[in-house]
Image: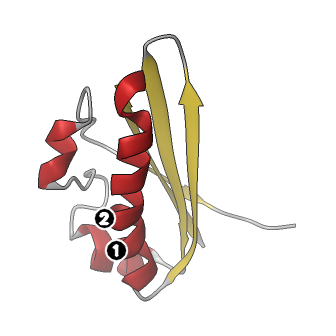
Amino acid sequence: MITRIWHGTTSISDADNYLKFLNESGIRDYKETPGNLSIKVLRRKEEHVCHFWTVTEWENLESIKAFAGDDLEKAKYYPEDKDFLLEFEEKVIHCETFQS
């Protein structure tokens, strides 16, 4: 199993609207991709910034490619992200995942 972790930031004022957008775009696409095993969205508000992480678990690298394309390390963005995100991190993190 492989865990994919993406991070993004919004302003505090955009946090709730971005969470709604995230559920309608990326989360929907994760769920529709064969090989996706789980999805978690983490959110942490600070003074003026809100951090988001999507933590997804996948059967294998091929299932991640079905979602993200051939460049697995490249973060996937949607055109509407420009309305919310403060920056566009280029890379995501992949980790082998073990359960005990």
**Residue sitting at x 51%, y 10%:** 47
Type of residue at label 2? Ser
Q: CA distance from mark 1 to mark 2?
A: 6 Å
Q: Which residue is mark 1?
A: 29
Tag 1, which secondary structure?
Answer: helix
Farthest-out residue, top: 47
Q: Which residue is mark 2?
A: 25
Farthest-out residue, bottom: 34
- Residue 100, percent across and down? 88, 67
On screen, residue 83 above or below 19: above
**Residue sitting at x 38%, y 25%:** 13
Q: Nearer the viewer, residue 54 or 62?
A: 54
Residue 20: image quadrant is: bottom left
**Residue sitting at x 34%, y 74%:** 29
* CB within 8 Å, label 1 to label 2: yes
Horizontally, is 41 left or right of 22 in the view?
A: right
